[in-house]
Amino acid sequence: MATIFTRIINGELPGRFVYRDDQVVAFLSVAPMSLGHTLVVPVAEVDHWIDCDPELWQHLNRVALQVGRAVQPVAGTARVATLIAGFEVPHLHLHVFGADDMSGFQLSPQAAKEFSDEELDAAAARIREAIESLD
């Protein structure tokens, strides 16, 4: 059975994509810790990051680096963080989000911030534009 991320990647469920190639996609989190919180996800269903092919792992991290550079001005935070948790969806994904201190590292639905659709659409557009300008 396909993961929820595979269903988003395949267009069966909506997603605010900021990056896509044949191996990796990036889309905004539905439970953001800050504005622009993005998930960087391999197209292939890899459950645990230690099982990831080394070349794919390198590519995933290169994309996460680009996404992080694009997220920081959108989030307006002192730092951009990346986390791998993997408990909520059994499909490898890197969380890339702005943070001003360690309190931003609470990945739970209760800690998620609320943003309007307009704010999220605008953030996704700004991140996409920034990533495109980095190429």
Image: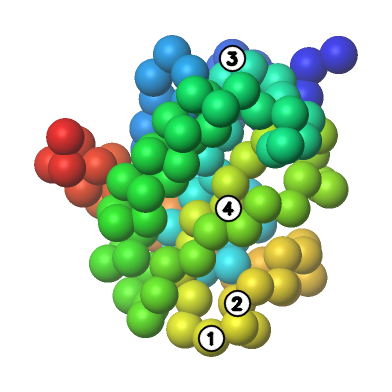
Q: Are marks 4 and 1 in contact (CB under 8 Å)?
A: no
Q: Residues within 10 Å of mark 2 (few under 14, many from 20)?
A: some
Please provide percent x and percent y for residue 67.
37, 48
What's under tag 2, amino acid-wise?
Gly
Query: Disc 1 versus disc 3: distance between alpha carbons?
Result: 35 Å
The residue that disc 3 covers is: 10
Mark 3 / mark 2, whichever is N-terminal: 3
Apparent side of residue 90 relative to residue 125 in the rendered image (left or right): right
Disc 1 element:
loop
Foreground pick, 61 / 28: 61
| Mark whose residue sits in front, 3 or 2 | 2
Residue found at x 52% / y 40%: 40
Q: Nearer the viewer, mark 1 or mark 3?
A: 1
Residue 101's label in the rendered image is 1
Mark nearer the viewer, 4 or 3: 4
Q: Is residue 9 visible?
A: no
Camera sees residue 24: yes
- Within-10-Å neighbours for mark 3: few <14, some 14–19, many 20+: few
Residue 31, image quadrant: bottom right
* Residue type marked 4: His
The residue to which callout 2 is attached is 104
